[in-house]
Amino acid sequence: MYGLFYSISRFIKYIVEIWVLVMNQIIEIIVPCYNEEQCVELFCNKICEIFDAMEKFDFIITFIDDGSKDATLSTIKNMSARMLKGKVQYISFSRNFGKESAIYAGLSNCTGDYIAVMDADLQHPPELLIEMIRIIEEEGYDCCAARRKNRRGEPIIRKFFSNQFYHIMNKLTIIDLVQGSTDFRLMKREMADAVASLTENERFTKGIYAWVGYKTKWIDYENVERAAGKSKWSFHSLFNYAGNGIIAFATTPLRGIVYLGIIVTIVSIIYAAYVVFKAVMYDGVRSGFTTLIVLITFFSGIILTTLGMIGEYVARIYMEVKNRPLYIVKEANLHRNDRQNHVEKSVD
Ligand code: UDP
Ligand code: MG
């Protein structure tokens, strides 16, 4: 009797193993969205179109609703419940935590074989996924990332600051940021896990991708206009984003302050020697009121700037030691599909 049970269980095990082998690989697409009610359905339709033509792969779209105030979540729920049952899942935040937190939430909950990160507004052309999959499968890369060929359609001032940002980042940090790089990429699950293992609060995901390493191939694409709605980034928020990126990966500004201090001290010593020399040689010191005012303002400026710069780092240390979660989930609908254990979990 025991032998029969043993044989049956072995047989079932083999069937399951064969099933896992022939089963399609799953590409999980993480899509952060904030007030994208006009885009999410368009996005899903486009993805369905693309995967219809691919036999070897299945897809799951994981929307991260970043505290949208419009009908984004209800549209996602609708698609998840009706048209695209099992293909669309979501995590919805209790408020707007920002795109970086949304990407982190997606990466730390993903279960697919390959993980893609894409914007909801179709500015990341979904057709590129086909080429990305080919590159990873056939050329032996761990990741394929997209970079904009140009910034056509963007204001000149934004283009200028953006170029400067990449220039500064590459000069000041050990990581190498590629000009025009976007968040759009497809990567092996292990790379997604590595990115999610960095749990810092002040996230700069583009830098983290570069930091974790892995073999990445860049492919170019033409800048595309938004499918609908408008960009969530103001000039001010982009400026903050750039500042965060630099501070997250570079301590060079702090080193710069030390050098500045040394240079100013040397210049002051030389100047003091000159004043003393003049006083001794020519008997008496001139009133020098203007010099005094200029020096006081100059040094006050330097002191305030350096204090401010140090303050920026201290503020980030403060935020990190608090160790707050990067996001709070209000509701979620994750069809966890763990292939090893063959368990289907659903969080509601
Ligand atoms: N996004 C987000 N949280 C935010 C701001 C943006 O999840 O606080 C999402 C947004 O819905 C979109 C992606 O991030 O899917 C890129 O945003 P957007 O298109 O506004 O940026 P841009 O393309 O202008 O850089
Ligand atoms: Mg966009």
Image (cartoon, rainbow, N blue to C red):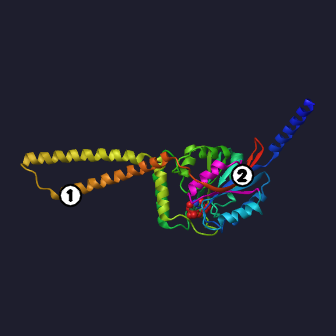
Would residue 98 be counted in the magenta stretch? yes
Which residue corresponds to the image point at 32% horizontal and 47% vertical from the top-left?
A: 260
Which image quarter is the C terminus in? bottom right
What's drawn in magenta, residue-wise?
86-112
Above or below, 3 relative to 297: above
Q: Label 2: state its secondary structure.
A: strand
Which of the labelled discs sits on residue 293, or is there none? 1
| Count of numbered tags | 2
Q: At x 53% / y 51%, what residue is drawn?
A: 204
Where is residue 339 drawn, in percent x and y?
76, 44
Q: Magenta stretch: residue 167 in it?
A: no
Residue 283 on image: x %, y %: 6, 48
The residue pinned by badge 2 equals 27
Quadrant of the displayed image that contains ligand 1: bottom right
Disc 1 CB within 8 Å of nearest ligand 1 atom: no
Callout 1 environment at 10 Å: few (<14), some (14 to 19), or many (20+)?
A: few
Q: Residue 342: x, y in percent?
A: 78, 44
Residue placed most toward the observer, 233 or 252: 233
Q: Amino acid at mark 2?
A: Ile
